[in-house]
Amino acid sequence: MYSQTYERKASNMLADEVNVTAYSGSLTADLHLPNEWITSLINFIADALPAWRDDPRRPIETGETKLSAQLCGRLNSLCRRTPGWDFLQFRREEPDETDGRRTIDIVASAAGNIIWIDGREYDDFRSLVPIECKRLPTPTSRKRDEREYVITSEGSTGGIQRFKAGHHGAEHKRAVMIGYVQAYDVTHWHKTVGRWIDDLITELPTAWTVADKPTLAAHDKSQRIANLVSIHFRQRGLTPHIQIDHLWIEM
């Protein structure tokens, strides 16, 4: 059973920003939402994480693909069950809208309707928020870089690196990275990721800055989750910067 308290919280959060009665369940109505609504969407995802992790029915998995599939399914169930959120859907392994050769782990998008935010149209084919999922630590392998959450020494498969360079979410101003913390804790990884970026600032001072370091915005130690935020300036031809909300959950 989903928490009624959680459902009321999510519903009330959205009701503050949009007429839920007018739009809930509609497949044709246009929704005009403020820029700040994206933050409510990210909070919706963050609030769902502890109950998803702790659900006794959830098979215990460690692999990123299976974890992300489980999470995507839970988010879709919540959208259908929570009043005011049923105009959304979450999808897995979606081609990037700018570079179709690359795939996004999870995307949040409209579910049969059109959503307008800051003059930009979002529908089934243009996602609202790209979501990248990473394990902390990176699985040990000769072909893997332990800094994969941030960057890789070869290629461009680092999590932050992808968004910063525009390989993911080139047209987006907001993105989410979900960190499945499978060893140590949030405090450890906050320090470790910050240290990796400090090293990059020293090595590549024109490419990396202090703004690239995730800043702790909220940390619920009882629920073992945290929200961190980083801002990344981009090269010409992309949105001037992208904000990444890092949602970390200790598994």
Image: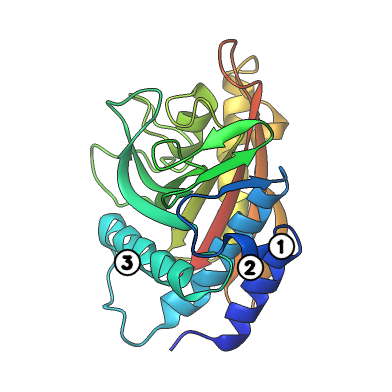
Judge whether residue 235 can be spotted in this image: yes
View extreme (left): residue: 142
Reading the image, the residue beneath label 1 is: 218
Reading the image, the residue beneath label 2 is: 21
Q: Say what amino acid the circle numbered 2 marks.
A: Thr
Q: Position of residue 148 (x, y in %)?
A: 41, 40
Q: Residues within 10 Å of mark 2 (few under 14, many from 20)?
A: few
Viewer-side label of 1, 2? 2
Quadrant of the drawing holding the N terminus = bottom left
Q: CA distance from mark 1 to mark 3?
A: 24 Å
Of the numbered discs 1 and 3, the one sitting upstream in the chain is: 3
Which quarter of the picture shows residue 118?
Answer: top right
Q: CA distance from mark 1 to mark 2?
A: 31 Å
Viewer-side label of 3, 2? 2
Q: In the drawing, what numbered circle is on residue 70?
A: 3
Of the numbered discs 3 and 2, the one sitting upstream in the chain is: 2
Label 2 sits on a secondary structure element that is helix
